[in-house]
Image (cartoon, rainbow, N blue to C red):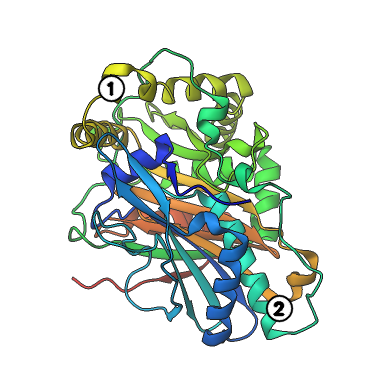
Amino acid sequence: MSRENWYKVDNVAKVFLATAAKRDTRTLRVSCTLWEDVDQNLLQEAVLSAIQIRPQFQVRIRRGIFWHYMEDTDLQPVVEEEHGRVCPPLYSPGHAMLHYKVTYYGKRINLDLFHAISDGTGAMEFLNIIVLEYLKLKHPDQFEHTTIHSGASEDELNQDSYKQFFGSMYLKGSSLKKAYHPSGLKLPYDQLQFFELHIPSGDILPKAKELGVGLTSYIGAKLMMAIKTDMPPRKMKTPINVSMPVNLRNYYPSSTSRNFFNNVNVSHVFFEDISFADLAKEFDDKLKANLSEENIKKQMDNFETMEYFVPVRAVPLFIKQMVVRYGSRVTDEKVSVVLSNLGVQRPPEELVPMIQNYGGFCSSSNLFVVMSSYNGDLTLGVTSPYSSTGVIKSFVRGLSEDGMKVRAYATEVIR
């Protein structure tokens, strides 16, 4: 089936396009670490093969009069050894460029992706296709019959699922209040710190089960406690809000490789002392309530409305982007930390002996934590725009005090 020449961008993509900046490039990274060093030439060949399977990523974003749009591009990806920053800028208005990049370092394969063209689920599937194509080349005949395919058609993979499933005609503002943000100076405008934490699943899952909460709630409550240690007494009445992206494919029948997620929020105000056990249970109850299908649908109806009002549709793009940037700043003020759970990674069974681990990061103007689990290891990719590492240290200390054996790695920041 031939592909269209151009595509509308979804509403989430419009936010990323309006707010991409030198610090928060709106880029996400997913990585797969093998048990053997990566061969650059074979990886290059594997990526060229993978884009034949997922041509949805072979697009260039262009500016229209009223909205951005995507068009097919013949630009070819070039695999390089990793250098420079994690989550590099992958969108520059008016410049011809791909909006994804594949790099490697040692045993690790990285896929950096501009968030406007896909979300964590789509990125992870694309990464796994690249890894499979690489291993097929590296070990001929061993994975000849292994595939990674949802069975979706090309139209289904290109679907704007927001428009497919949502769109009631009313607006409703967020009830969240301005949240607490860690104190201290931020890094220079184009820098972020990245931390990778590894925790044995056998250490942390029993602790969460003992409290009767899910892993996301356990980590979310630990983050709240860590941020609380940073709060001066006069700020104790300011809420700490954890925002969590939710994969809407778990609620609606969509196979799109484009963005299809929404954020839910859990907030707590430390009016008085509370034990970690009680906080974790409160977090878990609030999260479960927010994840009900009724609440998810209600939020998405509110979100998807703006595009359909004729006065808004007729406004030139540069004015729309000013409005979106302002709205994004207001939203950021209501978020203390973002916690994104990519879940347990399950590559094809034949690939399991070849893969050591998975991980991820996301650029952000706030604290951002990406969770993923694989092969008995919980990996947390922490992004921070702050010079101080106090909250990160408190978070690791809280895990260690619960008996976790935490291994931590960090990028070097040039000051």
How far separated are the C-alphas under marks 1 and 2? 49 Å
Mark 2 crowdedness (10 Å alpha carbons): few <14, some 14-19, many ≥20: some
Q: Is residue 409 left or right of residue 173?
A: right
User: Which of the two residues, 305 or 392, is positioned nearer the viewer here?
Assistant: 305
Q: Could you tell me which secondary element the residue under label 1 belongs to? A: helix
Q: Is residue 143 visible?
A: yes
Name the residue rendered at 78%, 68% in the picture. Answer: 146
Q: Is residue 308 above or below residue 64?
A: above
Indicate the secondary structure of the residue bearing disc 2.
helix
Q: Does residue 236 lie above or below 343 as drawn?
A: above
* Residue 136 numbered mark, or none: 2
Q: Quadrant of residue 81?
A: bottom left
Earlier in the chain: of badge 1 and badge 2, it is: 2
Query: Which residue is rendered at x = 59% and y = 36% of the image?
Result: 248
Residue 84 rendering spot, x and y as whole percentages: 32, 75
Residue 139 image position (x, y, % from top left): 73, 84
- Residue 358 in view (yes/no): no
Badge number at residue 312: 1
Give amino acid for label 2: Lys
Query: Residue 334: which quarter of the image?
Result: top left
Where does the image place residue 227, in percent across and percent down from the top left?
A: 37, 45
Residue kind at label 1, given as amino acid type:
Val
Q: Residues within 10 Å of mark 1 (few under 14, many from 20)?
A: some
Q: Position of residue 232 (x, y in %)?
A: 25, 40
Q: Tags 1 and 2 in contact by the CB under 8 Å rule?
A: no
**Residue at coordinates 59% horizontally, 33% vertically from top-left?**
284
Q: Quadrant of residue 127?
A: bottom right
Q: State left or right for residue 106 relative to residue 413.
A: right
In front here: 151 or 132?
A: 151
Of residue 38 and residue 164, the one placed in the foreground of this image is 164
Q: Nearer the viewer, mark 1 or mark 2?
A: 1
